[in-house]
Amino acid sequence: MAIVQGNEFPDHLYYDVDNQIWYQPLADGTLRAGFTAWATTLMGDVLVFTPKRIGKDFEKNKSFAVVEGGKWVGAARAAFDGAVVAHNEALMRKPELLNQDAYGEAWMAILRPLHESWADGLVTGKALQPALDAWFSSEAYKE
């Protein structure tokens, strides 16, 4: 498990480091997605979670959900083209779950990637710590 600035990044997940989104492959070929714990810390108290409708397509680098926090309002941007298969109803009712359990109960959506190459450009396993260290030291997140 990678730990950066006191935040955990489980190494079994796939990460879009630039957007701080994680993806977990599921047995049926879909992916569970959520924000990293580091991202939720920056958001402050999460007040609203609004996912795209089930069945709605999205494009790479476009939003599949919007989150409003005390310090930040922004989009969960996809790392690939796909469609929303399901979203977390519990998170819609209780958005503060994002601040409490980013990698568990606070998953945002189940996505179906359009292409088998969905993981291209994502980081996982042993490559995660060096990728996160480089990203944080570049201060790209401040742009």
Image (spheres, rainbow, N blue to C red):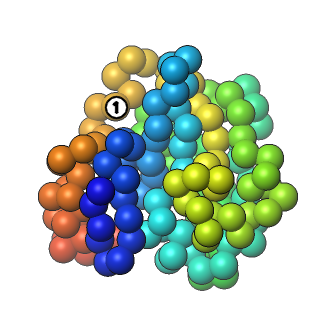
Label 1 belongs to which residue?
Answer: 119
**Image quadrant containing the C terminus:** bottom left
Tell me the residue at 39%/43% (across/down). 13
Residue 48, percent from left and from top: 75, 65
| Left or right of 78 in this view: 67 | right
> In the rendered image, which quarter contains the N terminus?
bottom left
- Locate residue 35, reporting x and y percent: 52, 57
87 on left or right of 24? right
The foreground one among 52 and 41 is 41
Q: Is residue 43 left or right of residue 69?
A: left
Residue, x 61% and y 49% (percent of image)? 107
Residue 105 position in % (x across, y down): 65, 53
- Residue 57's place in the image compared with 68, above or below, is above
Q: Residue at x 20, y 58 (%)?
A: 129
From the viewer's perspective, is residue 43 above or below residue 102? Answer: below
Q: Secondary structure at mark 1?
A: loop
Residue 95: image x %, image y %? 74, 64
Q: Is residue 8 above or below residue 24?
A: below
Task: Characterize the local packing of mark 1: few (<14), some (14-19) or many (20 or more) Cα atoms within 10 angstroms.
Answer: some
Is residue 142 visible from the viewing direction of this image? no
